Image (cartoon, helix red, strand yellow):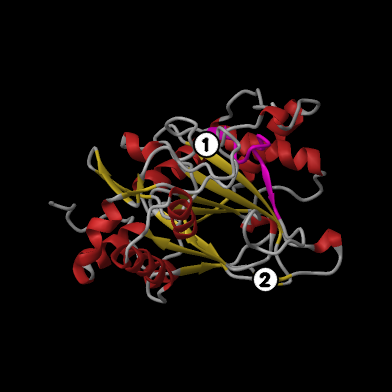
Amino acid sequence: MTRPSPISDPSAWRAGDMAADRRWIRHVTDGEAKELLSALAETQGNDPAADPKFVMLPAMVGCAAEILEELENGRGFVLLRGLPIDGLGDRELYTLYRILGAYLGAVITQNKRGERIVEITDRGAQYGPGVRGYTTRAYLNPHCDATDVVALLCVRPAREGGESCIASAMTIYNEMLADHPQHLDALFDGYHHNMRGEGITGNPDEVTTNAIPIFSDFAGRLSCHFNRRLIVQGAEKTGRELGPDVMAALDCVNDLALRDDIRLDMEFQRGDVQLLNNHMILHSRRAYEDHDEADLKRRLLRLWLNVPNGRPLAPDYADRTNGGPRGGMPVAPAFR
């Protein structure tokens, strides 16, 4: 089968390129900060969990357009630095973040509780079956989230560690094409992912209805959706054995995403918002050590966004949550 030619646009970057050219850091301007805080003042008293209703302001419209273009047609990631969060209480913080999300696209649900903003912090759990990685301080393997764009707002960094590590899926594809072509068939095949009890049925054994390919070539764009852990668990739950060729392909993607010349490490500062296109970027996280004091512990806020300039997606790739194409996580009846 013919595979796409090597990707040569800006999305196929390497760590050294990004370390030398840091234009992927986009600072919030004074005018943009003023507009965001003005929009926040307009929406005070509204439910911070609801979509904000406010007049779209010109500086932030321009900022959002710039970010969306970079996410879809550029490097595939942006670090927005300097969101004006100092002095805000939790309600204001959530509302401000939802306002930023509204400029960028549609905010979708992330879990069976229907949460549209998820707290990323250590809750003292041990990472393992039934425990989501974002509730721990454990190392997280390279993966993609089930949405167009994931945004992480840093409210407080860890005492030590917790760096975000990202890699271009397009560069990984190029490496596969050049040096590991024996793995390509496995990577374009589809796999049922474990839904972790958060699917339509709520059944702990539910897997994705679709067999989702790791690489999808559709409408002239190459997209990637990778989560080794969920693929392996999904195979166990369906009784489908993943042969040694598939396991070798999964391991190769994982190893390439962590390779020093491909992986870009990113430390967060308070007020940073990392935005990643999940069709182009794999992300992982280093383990971290935290402060003892509760009000100093590492705290990030996560949004999942479907963006207005998002690429067309193949039907067998687009539904990754059993909630329909580009659907959020299904909300359990108890939380509706």
The magenta span reads: 106-120
Which residue carries the number 1 mark?
104
Above or below — where is 69 with respect to 130?
above
Q: Could you give the CA–CA distance between mark 2 and mark 1, rounded to whole angstroms?
A: 30 Å
Amino acid type indicated by mark 2: Tyr
Main secondary structure found in the magenta portion = loop
Q: Is residue 111 magenta?
A: yes
Of the pair 191 and 70, the residue shown nearer to us: 191
Residue found 77% across the figure and 38% down from its top: 92
Does 49 sit left or right of 28 as displayed?
right
Q: Position of residue 79 (x, y in %)?
A: 53, 55
Vertical placement of residue 306 versus 228, above or below? above
Which residue bears the numbered disc 2? 288
Is label 2 in a helix, a strand or a loop? Answer: strand
Q: Position of residue 303 (x, y in %)?
A: 60, 43
Q: Is residue 290 one of those drawn in magenta? A: no
